[in-house]
């Protein structure tokens, strides 16, 4: 059994879990964190475009002039492409696959795209969807992503596993095909459905919390992440803030080499 996840932190936790629970979890973990909720999806996931996109998205100067960090980020897209190659080799070897996904846009996009790849394969394919919440005694625990799960708790979610029939994989592959045809700059989950949306879809949240009183960009992004559980990253907010600064709609009051540390306000 091969475990597949779509986020770096969740894949890291799964690797720890797999080492501890060797009899219950797979013998390898694949991370396919291609950020498919953002950007051109008519380009293949293993294309130069996607590799460069991943670097440019994460290297938004929040690291300042950290050459070592920049070098590491440049290898990120290539590393995920190598993960995909390993995954395809496992398929050829007849390995069973277990996909861990959630309703976060990046994860659901990854799941649908993978179903497109797997729609006709003869391997056993299983999926574990992150539940909206679990009940423990008198407590209801809500989850947003697999990255929130402690590594020693992954086995508790195996009860949610189901085998994906070929017809189900083809259904999800069809949804992915329509999203590829739309090829919008952004994909979001609305009422449980993954849909194409314009690039400014989340901008109203920035306007909701940005005033003419200067605030550190990192603090603003932290407020957005803490207030809205939408499954989007700090890097997306940083990307949009940078765009709005260039449009003259947000003003930099106090600049910094590390962009997350600069003070900004309404222009």
Image (tube, rainbow, N blue to C red):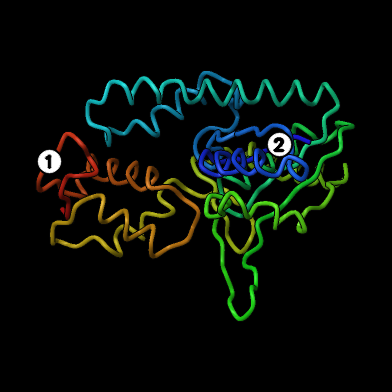
Q: How many marks?
A: 2
Whether 152 is drawn above or below 223: the answer is: above
Q: Nearer the viewer, residue 109 or 181?
A: 109
Q: Could you tell me which quadrant the N terminus lies in? A: top right
Q: Which of 127 and 182 is in front in this view?
A: 127
At x 64%, y 68%, the residue is 134
Residue at the (41%, 27%) spot, across then down? 55
Query: Tag 2's secondary structure?
Result: helix
Q: Mark 2 points at which residue?
A: 114
Residue at image point 40% right, 33% down = 57
Element at label 1? loop
Residue identifier under label 1: 255
- Which sits in the foreground, 207 or 63? 63
Query: Residue 48 location, x and y as percent?
Result: 52, 18
The Cα atoms of the two marked residues, 2 and 1, are separated by 42 Å
Residue at 73% over, 40% down: 22
Mark 1 or mark 2, which is nearer the start of the sequence?
2
Image-quadrant location for residue 193: bottom right
Instruction: From the top left corner, tell me how far across and down residue 25 is, in percent.
Output: 73, 42
Viewer-proximal residue, 240 or 15?
15
Q: How crowded is the residue under tag 1: few (<14 C-alpha within 10 Å), some, or many (20+)?
A: some
The outermost residue toward the left is 254
Residue at the extreme front of the image, as rendered? 20
């Amino acid at each position: 059994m091969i475990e597949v996840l779509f986020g770096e932190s969740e894949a890291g936790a799964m690797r720890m879990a797999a080492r501890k629970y060797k009899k219950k979890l797979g013998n390898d973990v694949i991370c396919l964190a291609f950020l498919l909720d953002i950007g051109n999806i008519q380009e293949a996931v293993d294309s130069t475009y996607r590799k460069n996109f991943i670097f440019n998205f994460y290297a938004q100067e929040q690291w300042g002039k950290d050459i070592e960090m920049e070098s590491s980020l440049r290898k990120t897209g290539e590393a995920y492409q190598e993960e995909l190659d390993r995954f395809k080799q496992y398929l050829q070897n007849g390995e069973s696959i277990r996909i861990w996904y959630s309703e976060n846009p990046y994860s659901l996009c990854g799941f649908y795209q993978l179903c497109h790849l797997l729609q006709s394969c003869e391997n056993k394919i299983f999926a574990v969807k992150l539940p909206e919440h679990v009940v423990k005694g008198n407590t209801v625990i809500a989850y947003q992503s697999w990255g929130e799960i402690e590594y020693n708790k992954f086995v508790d979610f195996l009860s949610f596993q189901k085998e994906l029939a070929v017809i189900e994989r083809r259904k999800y592959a069809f949804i992915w095909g329509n999203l590829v045809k739309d090829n919008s700059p952004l994909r979001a989950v609305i009422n449980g459905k993954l849909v194409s949306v314009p690039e400014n879809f989340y901008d109203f949240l920035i306007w909701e919390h940005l005033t003419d009183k200067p605030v550190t960009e990192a603090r603003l992004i932290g407020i957005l992440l803490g207030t809205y559980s939408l499954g989007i990253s700090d890097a997306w907010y940083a990307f949009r803030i940078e765009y709005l600064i260039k449009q003259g709609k947000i003003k930099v009051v106090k600049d910094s080499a590390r962009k997350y540390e600069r003070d900004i306000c309404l222009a």
